[in-house]
C-alpha cells in the first residue's frame, strides 16, 4: 500500500520516539522525504496506532501493535469504523471529538475500547489531524492503561478502606510529632478527649505534654521509650478531657524514622477508665475481704476470752456479799468486758460473722419508728428530711442491724456537720440490669430496695473515701471514735445480701446508698423483751462440749453453782464416749457448733440416736451463713450467741430443758 501524504510547510523535524505520540505534521513532512521510514515507524511502533477518516470514521490504516492488541486482523480493521470499538454511550462524544479533529484540534484523553473478544480496556489516546491518501484523516496512538487503572482503583479502594477503618475505629488513632503536637487524629480520639471533631482537637491542642497529660512526666517517659525501643505497648496514663475531667487511657505507638531520626509517632489510644474503676473496686473488695477474715478470726477468739471474763466477774458478784467492796471491782471488770464485747460485735458485723435473725421488714415503718431517736441523736441544728416510696417493697434483714445502720450513719453525718446542715433519708425501689452490674463490680442484676442517706457536711476526698469502710480507720481525733461505725454498716449490708456505695467530694457532702434485695412475705413483728429477775436453778444432767478449755470450765462452774450435774468433753468423740459410759440420764447436750473434727450438729444427731429424749442447746459466735452449713438455723433449734453472760446461759438452759418457760425467759440475755 502506498501512503500519500500532503507536504506541510516548515523545516523538517526529528523522528518521534516509539512510546511518544507522533506529531502528524512532522510525520507528513518526513514521509514526503522518506515514505519507507514512516512506514517503518508506524508499523513497528509498540503502541497501537491507526489512521481513520475524519468524515466517515472508517479505519484507513492500522499498525501491527493494534492488530495484536485488539485481536482484529488488518483486513477486519479496514472494514470497520472507529465507533465499533467504543461503548455505545461513548459514541456521541467520539463523533464530537472527530468533528473537532476535522477543524484541526488535537485530542488527548482516556476512553473505553472494546477488544474482539468483547472485553473492554481502558486506553489513553493522543491524536492529530493529517491528510492521508488525499483524505481528511486523524492519526491516533492508543496506550493501554487497564492495569494502571486497576492498580489505581485497587489503591483507591485500599485507601478508602484504610480511611474507613481509621475514621470508624472504636479506639483513638493519632499521629503526633516528638515535640508534642498532634498531626492527625480520628473522630474517636477527638470524642475520647471531649472535642467536637478532629479539627477542633487539632486547633485547640498544640502541646500534648502540657494540655493532655495529667502528669507531664508520663509524656516524657512515653517519648523516651519510643525513641529507645521504637515501639510502646499498653502504656497507661491519665489524661485531661477538654472539660477538665480525667480519664485513663492505654496507649500503643511506634516511632517513624527518616534518615535515622524520629519524625513522628503513630499509634492508638484506648479509654480504660471503666476498667480501672472496676480494678479499683476489685482491689478494694479483696482488701475488705482480707481485713474481714482477719477481724472475724480475731473477734471470734476474743469472744471466748470475753465470755470467760464476763463469766467469772459474774460468779464473783454472785458469791460476794452485796456490801463487799470487791463487788464494785467485779462490776467494773464486767463493764469493761461488755464494752469490749460491743467492739467485738462490730468486728463480727464487719466480717459478716455475726449471728443474725433476718425477718421480713418494711423499711419505711422502721424509719418512722427510728425518726424521733435519730432527731435526738443528730441534734437540733441539723434538719432531717425523709422521703418514702409508698409502694416500697419488703426486704429480709435483721431488724436490730437495720436500726444500727441508721444510727451509725446518723452519727457519721452529725460529726461531718458541726455547724449544722441537712440530712435526707430516702427509700425507693430499683431494678438493676446487666448493664449496671457490668459497671459495678459484684452487683448482681435483680430487684432491690434502696435506702439513701445524704448529708450536707464537709465531704471527703478520694483517698479518704477509699478507706471509710476499713475497721479502725477514722479521721477523728484520738479518743473521739473507734473507726468501726461505717465498717459495721458495711458488714451488716453484706451479711444481709446487699451492697453499699458512697459518693462524696470535699465541701459537697456525702451520700450513702444501701441496696437490699426485695423479698416476698408478711412483715414480722419483733417480740417484746423482758428480763428475768431470778437466775433459774436446776438439777438435771448436762453434757457440756466445748473445745475452748477456759470457756468450758467457766460454763461448768456456772451450771454446777446453780445445781446442775455437768459432764464435760473437749470434742465430739469424747462426748460420745462420755455419754456411752454414763449410766444415768442426760437431759441436755450443750455443745459448740464449730469444733475440730466432729461438728456440733453431727454430734447431736449421734447422741439423739443413743438417747432419743436428750435436748440440745448450741453455742456459737459464728455468722449465720457459716452455721447454716451445719443446719443450725432451723427456728426450732436453740442457739446461744457468744460472748454470753451467765444470766443468758442459765436462762437459755432453762428454756431448753423446760420449753414451757420459753415465753417467760425470752430476751433475758
Image (tube, rainbow, N blue to C red):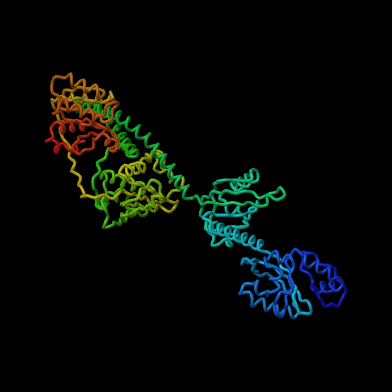
Q: Quadrant of residue 589?
A: top left
Say whether residue 149 is visible: yes
**Residue 615 x/y as whole percent:** 16, 30
**Farthest-out residue, left:** 660
Question: Residue 178's x, y, as percent?
Answer: 65, 51
> x, y (%) of residue 79?
69, 74
In the picture shown, does residue 518 fall above or below 586? below
Q: Is residue 189 above or below residue 217?
A: below
Q: Which quarter of the figure is the N terminus placed in?
A: bottom right
| Residue 563 in view here | no
Q: Nearer the viewer, residue 381 or 294?
A: 294
Q: Is residue 517 above or below residue 569?
A: below
Task: Give the total number of marks visible in the rendering.
Answer: 0
Q: Nearer the viewer, residue 117 or 278?
A: 117
Quadrant (top left/top right/bottom left/bottom right) for the C terminus: top left
Say which quarter of the image contains residue 623: top left
335 vs 186, left or right, is left
Residue 435, relative to residue 612: is it above or below? below
Measured as percent of width and height from the top left, residue 97 is found at 69, 77
Q: Nearer the viewer, residue 568 or 654?
A: 568
Residue 271 placement, left or right of 604 = right
Q: Nearer the viewer, residue 72 or 482?
A: 72
Amino acid at each position: 500500500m502506498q501512503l500519500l501524504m500532503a507536504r506541510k510547510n516548515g523545516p523538517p523535524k526529528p523522528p518521534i520516539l516509539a512510546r511518544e505520540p507522533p506529531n502528524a505534521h512532522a510525520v507528513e513532512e518526513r514521509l514526503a522525504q522518506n515514505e519507507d521510514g514512516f512506514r517503518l515507524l508506524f508499523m513497528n511502533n509498540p503502541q497501537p496506532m491507526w489512521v481513520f477518516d475524519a468524515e466517515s470514521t472508517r479505519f484507513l490504516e492500522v499498525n501491527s501493535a493494534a492488530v495484536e492488541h485488539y485481536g482484529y486482523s488488518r483486513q477486519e480493521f479496514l472494514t470497520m469504523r472507529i465507533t465499533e470499538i467504543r461503548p455505545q454511550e461513548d459514541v456521541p462524544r467520539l463523533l464530537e471529538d472527530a468533528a473537532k479533529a476535522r477543524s484541526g484540534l488535537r485530542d488527548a484523553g482516556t476512553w473505553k475500547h472494546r477488544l474482539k473478544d468483547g472485553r473492554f480496556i481502558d486506553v489513553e489516546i493522543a491524536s492529530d489531524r493529517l491528510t492521508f491518501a488525499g483524505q481528511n484523516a486523524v492519526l491516533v496512538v492508543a496506550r493501554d492503561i487497564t492495569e494502571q487503572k486497576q492498580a489505581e482503583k485497587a489503591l483507591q479502594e485500599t485507601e478508602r478502606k484504610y480511611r474507613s477503618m481509621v475514621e470508624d475505629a472504636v479506639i483513638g488513632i493519632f499521629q503526633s510529632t516528638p515535640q508534642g503536637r498532634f498531626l492527625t487524629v480520628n473522630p474517636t480520639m477527638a470524642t475520647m478527649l471531649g472535642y467536637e471533631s478532629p479539627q477542633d482537637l487539632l486547633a485547640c491542642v498544640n502541646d500534648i505534654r502540657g494540655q493532655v497529660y495529667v502528669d507531664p512526666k508520663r509524656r516524657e517517659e512515653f517519648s523516651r521509650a519510643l525513641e529507645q525501643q521504637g515501639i510502646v505497648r499498653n502504656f497507661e496514663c491519665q489524661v485531661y478531657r477538654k472539660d477538665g475531667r480525667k480519664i485513663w487511657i492505654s496507649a500503643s505507638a511506634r516511632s517513624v524514622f527518616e534518615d535515622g531520626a524520629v519524625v513522628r509517632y503513630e499509634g492508638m489510644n484506648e479509654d480504660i477508665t471503666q476498667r480501672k474503676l472496676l480494678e479499683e473496686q476489685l482491689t478494694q473488695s479483696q482488701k475488705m475481704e482480707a481485713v474481714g477474715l482477719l477481724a472475724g478470726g480475731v473477734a471470734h477468739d476474743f469472744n471466748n476470752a470475753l465470755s470467760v471474763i464476763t463469766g467469772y466477774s459474774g460468779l464473783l458478784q454472785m458469791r460476794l456479799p452485796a456490801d463487799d467492796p470487791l463487788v464494785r471491782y467485779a462490776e467494773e471488770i464486767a463493764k469493761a468486758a461488755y464494752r469490749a464485747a460491743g467492739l467485738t460485735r462490730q468486728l463480727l458485723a464487719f466480717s459478716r460473722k455475726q449471728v443474725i435473725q433476718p425477718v421480713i421488714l418494711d423499711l419505711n415503718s422502721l424509719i418512722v419508728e427510728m425518726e424521733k431517736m435519730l432527731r435526738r441523736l443528730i441534734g437540733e441544728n441539723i434538719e432531717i428530711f425523709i422521703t418514702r416510696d409508698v409502694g416500697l417493697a419488703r426486704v429480709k434483714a435483721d431488724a436490730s442491724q437495720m436500726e444500727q445502720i441508721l444510727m451509725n450513719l446518723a452519727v457519721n453525718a452529725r460529726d461531718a456537720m458541726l455547724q449544722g446542715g441537712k440530712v435526707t433519708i430516702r427509700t425507693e425501689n430499683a431494678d438493676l440490669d446487666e448493664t449496671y452490674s457490668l459497671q459495678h463490680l459484684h452487683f448482681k442484676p435483680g430487684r432491690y430496695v434502696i435506702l439513701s442517706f445524704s448529708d450536707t457536711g464537709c465531704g471527703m476526698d478520694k483517698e479518704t473515701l477509699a478507706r471509710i469502710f476499713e475497721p479502725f480507720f477514722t479521721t477523728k481525733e484520738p479518743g473521739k471514735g473507734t473507726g468501726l461505725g461505717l465498717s459495721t454498716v458495711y458488714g451488716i449490708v453484706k451479711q444481709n445480701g446487699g451492697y453499699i456505695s458512697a459518693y462524696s467530694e470535699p465541701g459537697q457532702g456525702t451520700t450513702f446508698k444501701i441496696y437490699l434485695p426485695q423479698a416476698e412475705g408478711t412483715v414480722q413483728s419483733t417480740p417484746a423483751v423482758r428480763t428475768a429477775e431470778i437466775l433459774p436453778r436446776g438439777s438435771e444432767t448436762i453434757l457440756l462440749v466445748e473445745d475452748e478449755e477456759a470457756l468450758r470450765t467457766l460454763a461448768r462452774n456456772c451450771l454446777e453453782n446453780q445445781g446442775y450435774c455437768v459432764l464435760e468433753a473437749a470434742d465430739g468423740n469424747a462426748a460420745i464416749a462420755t455419754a456411752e459410759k454414763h449410766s444415768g440420764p442426760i437431759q441436755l447436750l450443750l455443745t459448740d457448733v464449730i469444733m475440730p473434727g466432729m461438728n456440733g450438729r453431727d454430734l447431736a444427731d449421734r447422741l439423739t440416736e443413743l438417747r432419743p429424749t436428750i435436748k440440745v442447746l448450741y453455742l456459737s459466735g459464728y455468722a449465720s451463713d457459716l452455721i447454716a452449713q451445719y443446719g443450725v438455723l432451723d427456728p426450732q433449734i436453740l442457739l446461744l450467741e457468744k460472748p454470753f453472760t451467765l444470766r443468758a446461759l442459765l436462762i437459755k438452759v432453762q428454756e431448753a430443758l423446760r420449753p414451757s418457760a420459753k415465753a417467760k425467759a425470752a430476751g433475758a440475755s
